[in-house]
Image (cartoon, rainbow, N blue to C red):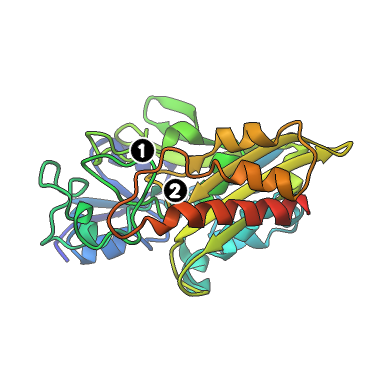
Amino acid sequence: MHPFAFTKASSANSALSAGARGGRYIAGGTTLVDLMRETVERPAHVVDINGLPYDDIAVTRTGLRVGSLVRMSELAAHPQVRAGYPAVSQALELSASAQLRNMASIGGNLMQRPRCPYFRDVHSACNRREPGSGCDALHGDNRMQAILGTSDHCVATHPSDLAVVLVALDAAVQVRDVDGSRSIPVRDFFLRPGDTPQDEHALRKGELITSLTIPAGAHTRRSGYLKVRDRQSYEFALASAAVALDISGGVVRDARVAVGGVATVPWRLPKVEHALIGKRPGRRTWTNAAALAADGATPLSENAFKVQLVERTVRRQLMTIGGQ
């Protein structure tokens, strides 16, 4: 690991000042430390933000607010979150390992880098790590890579389970820098690779995530997250689905559906949602809507199976949340 300066921030202002000068924020360190050890990232200055006052969880009539320094395990176990936002708890509990969930922060979860092996191997070509170098995954081992939202420059899947739920539930991320604060809808927070895969988030230099919010609704209580993977623990998704439904009077009044493990960003499925709203719950409704889940997919040489897998994953989760 290369030499670097280390500062433990005593206040938000001191952290933001260091961030404005190029300092990298660290909380649990479950991503950044790994990347520094592998020399994928070489920050000159690391800023410990664990002492900042962003560790609260608030559930109110209008929604859920979570501080960016809340640990994944803490949010997953919160009784009001489990009752009112079950998809959030489920996504967190299906992530990583218990030890990592105890360390990793909610803000850090949103900022984690791709798990693509070519990104993490400094001897491979990767446009995210070294713009213009190429993408070895396009014609290499691409079974785990994306089929949606890809470009000629990058096909890496987004690794976060929680982010899939946040996109489905119309969450927003609150951020702050030396010039002030702003709120970014999660659907706009993650950037597709396009021609600039090195730009992964809509953050400006030095901005720090302070919290995230999820608006309340009938659909949040009837929600869940399904993750399909090669093994049952400590594995990233081959396909996943976050589903939230508002069903009343025998009709689907509102539907929120997003998928993970198949796209370069957490992927919302508006066509699936449109096919659900106004319909009567049942196997035919779930099957017809799920058939649209892979619309626009561009499979690679080794991951065409994900087209059918994501359709089946969405259908199964619709059946679980909506009933037969």
Spatial CA distance of label 2 from label 1 is 9 Å
Q: Which residue is mark 1?
A: 201
Name the residue type under label 1.
Answer: His
- Tell me the quarter of the image containing the C terminus: bottom right
Q: Is residue 59 visible?
A: no
Name the residue type under label 2.
Answer: Leu
Q: Which residue is mark 2?
A: 110
Query: Which residue does the image show at 74% across and 58% down from the upper left?
Result: 79
**Residue 174 percent location from the top left of the image:** 51, 34
Mark 1 burial class by Cα count in 10 Å: few <14, some 14-19, many 20+: some
Q: Which mark is residue 233?
A: none
Q: Is residue 234 above or below residue 275?
A: below
- Residue in the foreground of this view, choosing between 129 and 47: 129
Asked if disc 2 and disc 1 are in contact, CB closer than 8 Å, the reply is yes
Question: Secondary structure beneath disc 2?
Answer: helix
Query: Which residue does the image show at 25% across and 45% down from the upper left?
Result: 154
Mark 2 burial class by Cα count in 10 Å: few <14, some 14-19, many 20+: many
Nearer the N terminus, badge 2 or badge 1?
2
- Residue in the foreground of this view, choosing between 305 and 28: 305
**Residue 242 percent location from the top left of the image:** 60, 49
Furthest-right residue in this view: 249
